[in-house]
Image: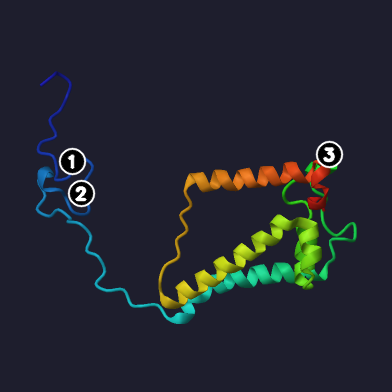
């Protein structure tokens, strides 16, 4: 032993800092090693109200949004912010006219809605179909999972870009809001 060091004697279990709390692995000299967690026996089935709560909550939020846009007219200036792309460049984005189309849909005027933003009206229809499917699956207890391949995301982006391009060209002025 080097000079100047003292031998403290035997070290307490768990090292010089005190006893180890909790289970100790067998290779560390312990007698107990935790095994894998046991899965729950059988989860209790959720009630119908709990299964449809989230889809109904999402649907309620969308209906509230449409009710607000239906009551506060976006055709009157000052109620909603102006599209920054349109304001600074004069170019219509794919969303330009979306609030006016939502206002028209809320009032049952589908012709005006398509005139304001046809792509948004198609999106409203797709969303309605998705909500019906989600509610039916939730009521049956089947989980809803949407997995879209990257090629579809690229396709959606291409449709949005093409829609923006065409609505800003002279021959596509019918698509402009």
Element under label 3? helix
Residue nearest the observer in this picture, 175 or 44:
175
Residue 78 locus on image (x, y percent): 89, 57
Mark 3–mark 2 Cα distance, whole angstroms, equals: 66 Å
Q: Which numbered tag is attached to residue 20?
A: 2
Element under label 1? loop
The image quadrant that residue 5 belongs to is: top left
Q: Are marks 2 and 1 in contact (CB under 8 Å)?
A: yes
Position of residue 86 relative to residue 100, above or below, is: above
In the displayed structure image, the side of residue 29 where residue 62 appears, left or right? right
| Disc on the earlier residue, 2 or 1 | 1
Q: Which residue lies at the image location 72% right of the left edge and 48% below the top edge?
A: 94
Element under label 2? loop
Residue 57 locus on image (x, y percent): 58, 72
Q: What residue is pinned by disc 3?
A: 88
Q: What residue is pinned by disc 1?
A: 15
Q: Which residue lies at the image location 84% right of the left edge and 61% below the top edge?
A: 74
Report the residue that reaches farthest toward the front. 171
In the displayed structure image, the side of residue 97 where residue 14 appears, left or right? left
Q: Residues within 10 Å of mark 3 (few under 14, many from 20)?
A: few
Residue 54 in sight from this viewpoint: no
Q: Which numbered tag is attached to residue 144?
A: none
Q: Residues within 10 Å of mark 1 (few under 14, many from 20)?
A: few
């Amino acid at each position: 032993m080097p000079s100047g060091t003292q031998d403290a004697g035997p070290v307490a279990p768990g090292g010089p800092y005190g006893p180890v709390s909790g289970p100790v692995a067998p290779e560390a000299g312990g007698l107990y090693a935790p095994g894998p967690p046991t899965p729950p026996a059988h989860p209790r089935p959720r009630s119908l109200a709990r299964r449809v709560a989230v889809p109904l909550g999402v649907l309620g939020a969308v209906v509230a949004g449409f009710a607000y846009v239906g009551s506060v007219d976006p055709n009157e200036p000052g109620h909603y912010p102006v599209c920054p792309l349109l304001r600074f460049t004069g170019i219509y984005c794919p969303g330009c006219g979306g609030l006016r189309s939502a206002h028209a849909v809320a009032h049952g005027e589908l012709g005006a809605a398509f005139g304001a933003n046809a792509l948004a009206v198609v999106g409203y229809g797709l969303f309605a179909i998705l909500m019906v499917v989600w509610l039916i699956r939730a009521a049956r207890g089947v989980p809803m999972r949407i997995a879209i391949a990257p090629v579809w995301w690229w396709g959606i982006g291409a449709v949005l870009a093409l829609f923006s391009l065409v609505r800003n060209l002279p021959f596509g002025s019918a698509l402009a809001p």
